[in-house]
Image: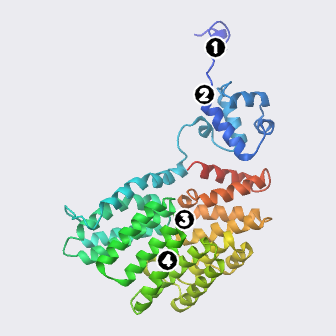
Amino acid sequence: MHHPTERRGYGRRMTPRVRADPAVGERIRARRLLRGWSVRFAASRAGVSHATWSRIERGLQAADNRFTLADIAGALECAPADLAGTGVPAPDRATAAALAGVVGLRRALIDIDLSEPPSGAAPPVAELSRGVVLVNALFEACDYAGAARLLPDLLRDLHTETAGPDHLEALRLLCDATSVASSVLRCLGHPADAWLGAERCRDAADAVGDPVLRGQAAFALARSATACGSYQRGQTLAERAVDDLGHHLSRPGAAEVLGSLHLVAALASRCRQRLEDSRDWLDEAAELAHRTGETNAMGMFFGPTNVDIWRMSIEVDDGDPARVVEIAHRTDPAAIPAGIRQVFYYADTARALTRLGGHDRGAIRFLLIAERIAPQHVRTSAELAETVRTLLNRSRRQAGGTELRALCERLQSR
């Protein structure tokens, strides 16, 4: 039986003082500054003295009491594990997996050079076709981690099958798969790797000799070039492809690809500070969309709704944010059954409301909807991170601040 004084902690045997971990203090300070709070204000929220908080931040005192750490975490609206540096928040594992998949996808794209003879055996082309359908579905759902996990093996198998008896079908499937790979890489913030994927798409399209597939590849190239900041190159690629495809409009999917090329030409024009030219391209795309209706040819979801969503993206930065909100009111994003397009509707509406000012509640609501639809997309978007920071600087402790700070934490952890 222990002596009562030993059980209560009295006597000679004292618990050694825990040494401060400076990393914990740095995390606390970073999260406090992210909110724009003074030490005194943050400490008052936690119920500790400002002197204690300051010593912990500077690494002079350990937050060795789990209740103290919990109080500080509560004040900063995060988990104690986030401050202690233990574990990865479960909602961000998919985002981390998506970013980690970039390396494997890049290697696969380097390996599948059609000028190099493939080796080995591949699954039957029917199985490969099902694989392409699956990665398309994952991308459309903004599951970049899932698509990045499956694409490398699929790309290599398709490359192998291009030397087999079903080589034309394998090349068509390879065109689709490399287009998806390019889009995934671009959405994850790797536009140069996306350009490599688009080049592989062009190689496959050229090998088939199909003008519609060449248009699809040109779209991927123009999107990647524009994402890299090569706006004139993106414009040239899109315009040249529009001219080429205009001679083949009787082919299935040609009108939809042509309309999508008009959209990327509009984007490149906007990036070149030629907003009126951009609007002209959009108007031409709208005319085509009126004729095609809502479609999903070539996985592009071209139609009136998508033209409006592109128009919102183009107007939100250099155009008229009030016009974006007006378009949003008349547009039903559910007309496109794909998260990859819906997320832009909600994200760009949030950005427009942020630019207008006085609509922060609505902006936060739209951001949270966008994150619910496509968390991997939102949490890897530099544009949305900037929007969240702008809202956070305005919110402080106003309505919506708690949700906004939590979203900011999720973006900061990427």
Q: Quadrant of residue 168?
A: bottom left
Q: Quadrant of residue 341?
A: bottom right
Tell me the CA gap for discs 2 and 1. Answer: 28 Å
Tell me the CA gap for discs 1 and 3. Answer: 68 Å
The three-letter amino acid code for the residue at tag 1 is Arg
In the image, taking residue 106 as reference, residue 233 lies left or right, namely: right
Quickly name the residue at label 2.
Answer: 21
Q: Looking at the image, which is closer to me, 292 or 314? A: 314
Of labels 2 and 4, the one closer to you: 4
The three-letter amino acid code for the residue at tag 2 is Asp
Q: Residues within 10 Å of mark 1 (few under 14, many from 20)?
A: few
Of labels 1 and 3, the one closer to you: 3
Tell me the CA gap for discs 4 and 3. Answer: 13 Å
Q: Looking at the image, which is closer to me, 310 or 138? A: 310
Quadrant where the N terminus sits is top right
Quickly name the residue at label 3.
Answer: 229
Quickly name the residue at label 1.
Answer: 7
Quickly name the residue at label 4.
Answer: 236
Q: Looking at the image, which is closer to me, 323 or 232? A: 232
Q: Which residue is depicted at the point 37% across and 62% down?
A: 151
In the image, taking residue 118 as reference, residue 68 lies left or right, namely: right
Q: Is there any visible trace of residue 398 in the rendered image?
A: yes
Asked which secondary structure carries label 1, the reply is: helix
Tell me the CA gap for discs 4 and 1. Answer: 80 Å
Tell me the CA gap for discs 3 and 2. Answer: 42 Å
Q: Residues within 10 Å of mark 2 (few under 14, many from 20)?
A: some
Of marks 2 and 1, which one's residue comes earlier in the chain? 1
Circles 2, 4 touching at the beta carbon (< 8 Å): no
